[in-house]
Image (cartoon, rainbow, N blue to C red):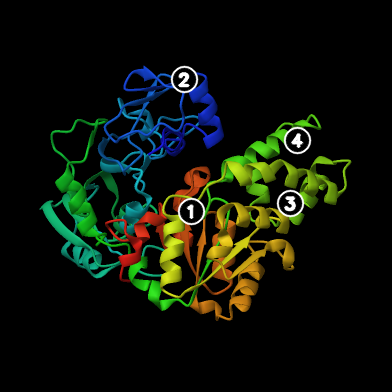
Amino acid sequence: MRLDKFLALGGAGSRSEVKEAVKKGLVLVNGIRVKDASQQIDPEDTVTFKGQVLSDCMGPRYYMMHKPAGVLTATQDKYEKTVMDLIEGISPKGLFPVGRLDKDTEGLLLLTDDGALAHELLSPRKHVEKTYQVLTEKPLAPEDISRLQAGIHIGDEKPTLPAKVECRTPQDILLTIQEGRYHQIKRMLQAVGNNVLYLKRLSMGGLTLDPSLPKGACRPLRKEEIELLKQANGKKQHPLKKKLSEFQGILFDLDGTLVDSMWMWRQIDIEYLSRFGIPLPEDLQKEIEGMSFSETACYFKQRFALPDEVETIKQDWNAMTAYKYGHEVFYKAGAEEFLRLCRKKNLKLGVATSNSRELADIAARALSLHDYMDCILTACEVNRGKPAPDVYLEAARRLGIPPDKCLVFEDIPAGIQAGKAAGMQVCAVEDAYSKNIREEKMSMADYYIESFTELLSDTGHSDTEQC
């Protein structure tokens, strides 16, 4: 793998930013300062960026933590300590906790950067078992145990799935559930007139808390433990691989989905607004998410009271992005190989992007998109941008395929919502610029991938994959 790609995957910055860092001598490989960003590195190499050792970005990482009480299960918080504050000697970049343990709950917590595995473990459809030690306020009566084992209403639309209950003492039980609803165990006990005094997760899927691991400590999972987790949810093959043959067409968002370009837009926003002495607002990305190119330009003019006309704003943005699309934006890992696989399977392919027509054409030329796509459509060519379904419905019409026979790949909630509103199945795609809303994306989409490589053959030879 090229050094600049390794650094970008490791969260050190965009391709252009890490190239500049390499030129400045801020990167060491095996203790030796390098100045060539194209240098090839091996998995065994130690890469140091600005004095910090970057973990291996060539494969997923898995860690077991013994979470103590009093710590939030979150990647960051302005006011309270999180589980990420406890890890030592490990690069936190890309890591996130799988599921949430309440602040006062202890026990097993999985930390990983394998988004696809996390999605499978958390998916309600998978029924992955989680076992907890529960100390109750009062002894559980036999009829209470029966209600928990049969499934119980806790205020949601549906009752819980049947639980397993093992009484070690009348007030010390092992409770195994197959879901992960909000405060589920506490609400289950309240439903039988009881309360939880102490809660500790002991296992998840095939992974059991190491009894020798101190509270607050973290260690890498052993190979056999990783395999147990994958076996628990059947992750020998991504579930979408088998279902590709059920679709007639596949539609792709462009930025952040097919190509690694989201870094570019934030930089352009900063540079453009600085012309008018305006700092970048923190909420800007959320506000414009999913808007078409024209809608975004109108939003900028109105919000920031810009003197330029909308068409001038769009022309300025086109000029600022044209070079980057032509020279600094590349396919995401496995994306082009996946496109070749789809063509081999005779699937109709299309792009439905919020970009302008001009930028879509620039990207198409730079990435040879016309070699794969049957249509390239922009949200400016329909009535409404995402999260409205217009662009996906029109793309399906141009492909001549019913919406329910289309699969959409998207990286942001507004795009996922647009695909679902169009009556299509949606696969959420991991992107560095939306990692903080990973769980939201997982809950909205039908499928989730960390990269397109998960949909290729295990050997990497996508042309021989049988789905």
Closer to the eye: label 3 or 2: 2
Of residues 34 and 125, the one nearer the viewer is 34
Closer to the eye: label 4 or 2: 2
Quick one: label 3 or label 2, which is nearer the N terminus?
2
Q: CA distance from mark 3 to mark 1?
A: 23 Å
Q: Residues within 10 Å of mark 3 (few under 14, many from 20)?
A: many
Quick one: label 3 or label 1, which is nearer the N terminus?
3
Q: Amino acid at mark 2?
A: Leu
Q: Amino acid at mark 1?
A: Glu
Q: Position of residue 143 (x, y in %)?
A: 20, 66
Quick one: label 1 or label 2, which is nearer the N terminus?
2
Q: Quick check: 367 left or right of 297?
A: left
Q: Quadrant of residue 370?
A: bottom right
Quick one: label 4 or label 2, which is nearer the N terminus?
2
For the point 12% across and 55% down, which residue is it?
A: 167
Q: Secondary structure at mark 1?
A: helix
Residue placed under numbered mark 4 in the picture: 273
Of residues 45 and 110, the one nearer the viewer is 45
Badge 4 vs badge 1, beta-carbon distance below 8 Å:
no
Q: Amino acid at mark 4?
A: Leu
Q: Secondary structure at mark 4?
A: helix
Question: The C terminus lies in which quarter of the figure?
Answer: bottom left
Q: Quick check: 310 left or right of 148?
A: right
Disc number placed over residue 26 in the picture, else none: 2
Q: Position of residue 194 (x, y in %)?
A: 28, 54
Q: Position of residue 409 (x, y in %)?
A: 50, 62
Residue placed under numbered mark 1 in the picture: 440
Badge 4 vs badge 3, beta-carbon distance below 8 Å:
no
